[in-house]
Image (cartoon, grey):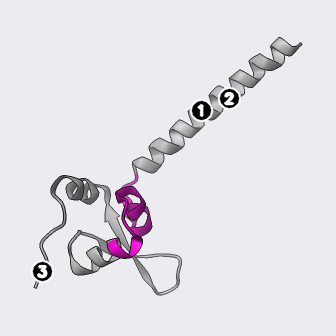
Amino acid sequence: METDQLLIFIQRLSKIEELLSTLITEKLCKDYYSTSEAAEMLGKAEFTVREWCRLGRIRAEKRRCGRGRFQEWMISRQELVRFRNEGLLPVHR
């Protein structure tokens, strides 16, 4: 009886691992990221990433969010890849 329970446990654990792998893949493959998500990925403060967006140092666009009339900066996956490869854009004056 213990062997059967152990096999069931191992099967359930395998299913959990598959689901976690799927969730991680989906999270990594988003088209757009919020400033908080981007900050976490880049190891920076969220304020810093928002300032980069505001100053045009990183390409981002404002999108409606669930906070009423306020909008939130959203950064594309392609822009994050560009930033990692090339760094910040020059300051526009």
Q: Which residues are magenta?
A: 30-48
- Could you tell me which residue is drawn at 82 percent across and 19 percent down? 5
Residue identified by numbered label 1: 17
- Give the camera-side residue of 73 and 42: 42
Q: Residue furthest right?
A: 1
Q: Are there few (<14), some (14-19), or many (20+) residues within 10 Å of tag 2?
A: few
Residue identified by numbered label 3: 92
In the image, residue 4 above or below residue 16 = above
82 relative position to 4: left or right: left
Residue type indicated by callout 1 = Glu
As helix, strand or loop, the secondary structure at mark 1 comes to helix
Q: Are there few (<14), some (14-19), or many (20+) residues within 10 Å of tag 1?
A: few
The tag on residue 13 is: 2
Decide: marks 1, 2 in contact (CB < 8 A)?
yes
Q: Earlier in the sequence, mark 2 or mark 3?
A: 2
Number of on-image labels: 3
How much space separates mark 1 and mark 3, taking CA atoms? 47 Å
Name the image quarter holding residue 34: bottom left
How much space separates mark 2 and mark 3, taking CA atoms? 52 Å
As helix, strand or loop, the secondary structure at mark 2 comes to helix
Residue 84: image location, x then y, percent: 23, 54
* Residue 32 counted in the magenta span: yes
Residue 91: image location, x then y, percent: 14, 77
- Could you tell me which residue is drawn at 52 percent across and 37 percent down? 21
9 relative position to 68: left or right: right
Q: Are there few (<14), some (14-19), or many (20+) residues within 10 Å of tag 3?
A: few
